[in-house]
Amino acid sequence: MNPREKYQIPHDSIITIAGTVGVGKSTMTNALAKALNFKTSYEKVDTNPYLEKFYADFERWSFHLQIYFLAERFKEQKKIFEYGGGFIQDRSIYEDTGIFAKMHYDKGTMSKTDYETYTNLFEAMVMTPYFPHPDLLIYLEGSFDAIIARIHERGREMEKNTPISYWQELYKRYQNWINNFNACPILRINISDYDLMKEETSIEPILERIGHFIQQSRRWKSRDRV
C-alpha cells in the first residue's frame, strides 16, 4: 500500500509548507511530494531578479520584491487549480502579505502607498476562482538558534551577511502570524522532531498526522455544506 492510501490522504489535496527563512521548507516539500507522488510548487529564489538587490537595500527594493513574489505565487495557484490539486507547495502566499509586506511597512522600508497597492492587489487575487485554499498548512518551527544555524549552513552570502536583527524580527513576526492564522487548518511540526536528510523514515509519523488533519478538515467542510 502506498503512503497516500495508507494514511488516507486524498489525491487532490493541496498542502502548503510555511515557516521562516531557513527552517527547511524546501526539504519538507520535496520529501512529502516524493512520498505521496504529488507535484511540487517551489518558491522561485534563484531566478528572482530582485532578491540580491533587496538584501542590499530593503527600502529601495521591498515593493518590487513583494510584487514579483505575488505574481509568481498567483501563477502557481492557477496551475494548481488547473491540475486539480495533488500538490505540495513551498511557502504560502499568506506569508507574503501577513509577514513580509507588513514588516516592511511597519519598519518604514515600504511606503504607505506601496503597501496599500500591494495589499489591494493581494485581496483581488485571492478572491478569484483560480485561488484554491490549501487543505492543510504545515508550519515548521524551531528555536531561533537552530534556524540561524541552518541559514549559515545553507551558505547563501546575501543571507549570511544580513543583520541578525532582521532574522530576529522575522522570527517574532512568524510566531505572531501563525498564532492568528485561520485561512485553513494548521499542523505545527518542530524541526527537532525529524531529520529528513539523514533518516527518510522520519517522514512516516508526519504523513500519519497529515492524513488525520486532512480527514478532519474535510469532515468539517462537509458539515458546513449541510
Image (cartoon, rainbow, N blue to C red):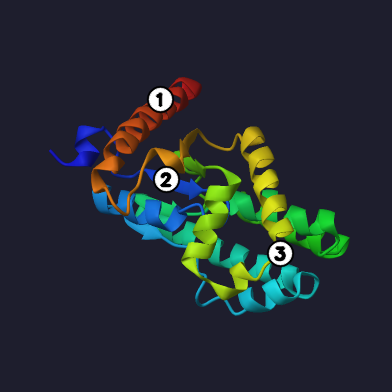
Instruction: Indicate whether 204 appears above or below 37.
Output: above
Q: Is residue 37 visible?
A: no
Q: Residue furthest left?
A: 1
Observer-nearest residue: 46 or 211? 46
Residue type highlighted by circle 2: Ile
Q: Earlier in the sequence, mark 3 or mark 2?
A: 2
Q: CA distance from mark 3 to mark 2?
A: 32 Å
Q: Earlier in the sequence, mark 3 or mark 1?
A: 3
Q: Quadrant of residue 174?
A: top right
C-beta proximity under 8 Å, tags 3 and 1: no
Q: CA distance from mark 3 to mark 1?
A: 42 Å
Instruction: Indicate whether 204 appears above or below 39.
Output: above
Observer-nearest residue: 171 or 165? 165
* Image disc number at residue 15: 2
Q: Position of residue 139 (x, y in %)?
A: 51, 42
Residue type highlighted by circle 3: Pro
Observer-nearest residue: 46 or 72? 46
Mark 2 Cα-neighbour bin, 10 Å: few <14, some 14–19, many ≥20: many
Q: Taking 209 as reference, is 51 left or right?
A: right
Q: Is residue 53 visible?
A: yes
Q: Taking 192 as reference, is 114 left or right?
A: right
Residue type highlighted by circle 1: Gln
Mark 1 Cα-neighbour bin, 10 Å: few <14, some 14–19, many ≥20: few
* Image disc number at residue 163: 3
Q: Position of residue 86 (x, y in %)?
A: 33, 49
* Image disc number at residue 216: 1
Instruction: Indicate whether 9 appears above or below 57.
Output: above
Q: Earlier in the sequence, mark 1 or mark 2?
A: 2
Mark 3 Cα-neighbour bin, 10 Å: few <14, some 14–19, many ≥20: few
Q: Position of residue 148 (x, y in %)?
A: 57, 55
What residue lies at 64% left-to-right and 56% top-to-bottom? Answer: 96
Q: Quadrant of the N terminus?
A: top left
